Amino acid sequence: MDQIQKSLLAQVADLHEVPEGAYNIRTNGKLEGRNTTANIDIVTKEDKPGIDIIIKPGTKNESMHIPVILSESGLKDLVYNDFYVGEDADVTIVAGCGIHNCGVDTSEHDGIHTFHIGKNAKVRYVEKHYGEGDGSGERILNPTTVIHIDEGGYMEMESVQIKGVDSTERITEADLKEGATLIVKEKLMTHGKQKAESKFTIDLNGENSSANVISRSVAKGESEQTFISHLNGNNKCAGHTECDGIIMDQAKVNAIPSLSAANLDASLIHEAAIGKIAGEQLIKLMTLGLTEQEAEEQIVNGFLK
């Protein structure tokens, strides 16, 4: 890997050297490196681009990395990755995509990730998206995450995109069985003329299932963001979505919540707040010696932590 690719890898997966444990690194549409362990196997799909990740039942305290790097202008990459997490497993999965585009053609990565989480299994999933490069070609990332959680299963998903992506459509679909839990934490920042759309559809099918979706976003310049959530309570369950947005300059932010209950004991809540940075916050930081721009950056960074 060259220095640009190594830098992208550090941005999206916090990797500065070959990781321990299982990993699959994809660069410019091709396999760059792979390692499996006794408990985590990675198999190349035969019918379409992508991989199957098989995690044995009872696997504990293991992690795997599956980053994707694009450094060729004009490349369009599509992968289908399926995760099969065995019963009682407890694992961390770090994904993400970085695009470096110094050309005039569009570079795009579309990743469809499907999770099959077994009974009482626990998954922490971290996905970071990042773009850079001084070319006029666009950097496009369209992640789709489909989540199936069996009885008593748990998934925590952290999705971060804070720089350099011109256009993104982020789709998350989930269905939960009895006692299953899903927690999603999204952090998003757009600037210039960038566009970002996040769509969440969660079906709480099992008794005592629960979901909590928290999105924090900052829109700068003339960028536009849309947050859409559909929360469907089909049993005794608890569901909550929260969208907090800071709007700056001439940006636009849309929040479109939808709640649907088909059971008397379904408890569903949506919260949304969009607003500008409070003047008193800026003044307080500026009295400490910061410029207005530095004060804004401090507030935005704190909001997205």
Image (cartoon, grey):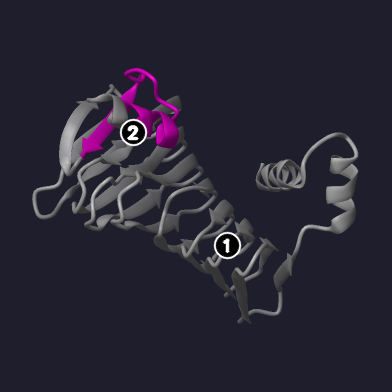
Please indicate whether residue 137 sits to the left or right of residue 157 in the image.
left
**Within-10-Å neighbours for mark 2: few <14, some 14–19, many 20+:** some
Quadrant location of residue 277?
Answer: bottom right
| Tag of residue 221 | 1
Check whether the beta carbons of the residues at disc 1 and disc 2 lie within 8 A of each other.
Answer: no
The residues colored magenta run 6-27
User: In the rendered structure, which disc, 1 or 2, sits on the residue that comes first in sequence?
Assistant: 2
Quick one: quadrant of the C terminus? top right
* Picture coordinates of residue 221, whole percent (x, y): 57, 62
Q: Residue at x 90, y 39 (%)?
A: 287
Residue 7 visible = yes
Please indicate whether residue 96 sits to the left or right of residue 32 in the image.
right
Element under disc 1: loop
* Picture coordinates of residue 77, whole percent (x, y): 21, 52
Is 22 contained in the magenta span? yes
The residue identified by callout 2 is 56
Give the residue type at disc 2.
Lys
